[in-house]
Every structure is written in structure tokens, then in C-alpha cells.
Amino acid sequence: MTPGPSPLAHAWAFDELSTAGPEHLDAGQVAAYDARAQFDPAPDIDVLRAPGLSRQDTVLDMGAGTGTFAVAAAPLCRQVLLVEPSRAMLDAAAEKLRAAALDNVRLIEGSFLSLQVAPPVEFIFCRNALHHLPDFWKVQALRRLRAALKPGGVLRLKDIAFSFAPAQTEASLSQWLEAAAHYPPGSYTADMLATHIREEFSTFTWLLEPMLERSGFCIEQAEYSSSGVFAAYICRAA
Ligand SMILES: C[S@@+](CC[C@H](N)C(=O)[O-])C[C@H]1O[C@@H](n2cnc3c(N)ncnc32)[C@H](O)[C@@H]1O
């Protein structure tokens, strides 16, 4: 099950930084990330507590950004492995960890497709990062997340993923962009959402779910926003 190196892998290796989003690689833009994202980790902490997150467990935060979730999770577990490909994000996360005086978060410069974790961990959190990969590579990423989890371990996956029917595409995406006019100042604009749709790789939930299952996960819970553009999953490593 663990993805091993292929002798020809270098010939088809994917350049993850090429799709990581320029706004995540630039220190100036990263400085504005928290104000824009307005991410409250508390509900996700509760989601991990329900299946038993404890001081014995390790949590891997994949595509962790500025570390907002890691800072909230660290006091509740043994260790957080904070994995990020962006140096600017890692620097921002390091600053946040220093301010919170946390010493059980390990910063790892890494990515979905380079992930190798031993021993496997009990929990993985991954929010708004998987959409940076095209679908074929999402599956390769999910295989690596599965290999990084103990059997029975939990993956909390949240992302921009479309639960609407194909015929609803124009209406649903128009509503999403129109709603941005009511977002708080400094948050995402309609232009930014349009760039997301055009240049990133958010997929349909009904494509993502078989990808999860074929990569070795059982989906225990799937929630879709009423807008049809956000999805949240609790998955178990089969
Ligand atoms: C929208 S931010 C989300 C950050 C954080 N998870 C949060 O919820 O605030 C997306 C993050 O995914 C990271 N990312 C992009 N491509 C990635 C990849 N191939 N592997 C891992 N992380 C990636 C970016 O650097 C960025 O920090």
C-alpha cells in the first residue's frame, strides 16, 4: 500500500510548487492570509475530539498554511506535524508557534506528493489544500495520506468541492461569486473566487468521494454547504 519510488518517477514527477498558488508563496501576501481566510479552527478541533483525539496522538496538518489549526490542536495532543511546501507559510507558522510558546509542533517543508511519515499517525487534518492538485494527482496525494495514517486513523478533509449537479454549474458558481460582495472587508473577493475556479483544481464531490474510497478511506460523514461549493469529510483509514 505504501507508495514506493518508481524507477521512472523522475520522468513524470509533478511540480507541486507550480500549482501551490502564487499568493501562498509570497511573504507579503502570506502576511494578509489570516485576515482573508478568517479561519476558526474550533469546530474542527471538536470533530477530532469526538473520535478520541488525546495526548497520546499525533496529528498531521497537511498544507497547514500559517498554522492556525496546528496551534489550536497542539495543546490537545502529543505532537503536530505541520507540513507545508511554502517557505513563506512556514515562516508565518513558526512565528505563530513562538508567540503561543508551543514546543510540540514540528515544522516540515513538504507536500502531498513528497509525504513520507513513519510511524503512521492517528489523525490527519487537511483544509483547502487538496484542490491545488489535478485529479490524477489528488489520488496520488490521498494514497500518501492513507499510508501516513494508522489503520482506523481519521482524516478530516475540508475543501472547496462542488456538490451541485452539472446542470447547476452556472447558477451555483454565479451565486458563490455574488455572495463575495457580502464577505467581510479584507476577505476573498469575487475576482479571487473566479481565479480559483479558473486556475485551481476544485472538483465535484461525486468525483472526489470515489477517489477517497479507492485510496483506502471509508467516508464516515460528508457535509456539503448549502451553496454547493464547500465539502467537509470525516474519513477512516480502512
Ligand atoms: C488556502 S491555503 C490553506 C491553509 C490552511 N490549511 C488553512 O486552512 O488555513 C492552501 C495551502 O495549501 C498549500 N499547498 C499548495 N499546494 C500544496 C501541495 N502540493 N502539498 C501541500 N500543500 C500545498 C499552500 O502552500 C497553502 O498553504
Image: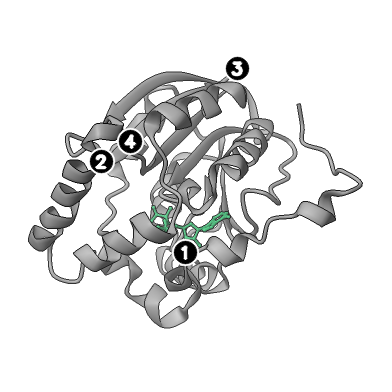
Label 4 CB-ligand 1 distance < 8 A? no
Q: Which amino acid type corresponds to the residue marked 1 in the rendered image?
A: Leu
Number of on-image labels: 4
The tag earlier along the polypeptide, 1 or 2, is 1
Q: Are marks 1 and 3 in contact (CB under 8 Å)?
A: no
Crowd around label 4: few <14 · some 14–19 · many ≥20 (10 Å): many
Distance Cα–Cα, label 4 vs label 3: 21 Å
List x then y, in percent, for residue 60: 56, 43
The residue at 22%/48% (across/down) is 173
Of helix, strand and loop, which one carries label 3? loop
| Residue 169's disc number | 2
The tag earlier along the polypeptide, 2 or 3, is 2
Distance Cα–Cα, label 1 vs label 2: 40 Å
Label 1 CB-ligand 1 distance < 8 A? no
Q: Quadrant of residue 15?
A: bottom right
Q: Are marks 4 and 3 in contact (CB under 8 Å)?
A: no
Q: Which amino acid type corresponds to the residue marked 2 in the rendered image?
A: Thr
Crowd around label 1: few <14 · some 14–19 · many ≥20 (10 Å): many
The tag earlier along the polypeptide, 1 or 4, is 1
What residue sits right under mark 3 in the picture? 238
Q: Nearer the viewer, mark 1 or mark 2?
A: 2
Q: Are marks 1 and 2 in contact (CB under 8 Å)?
A: no
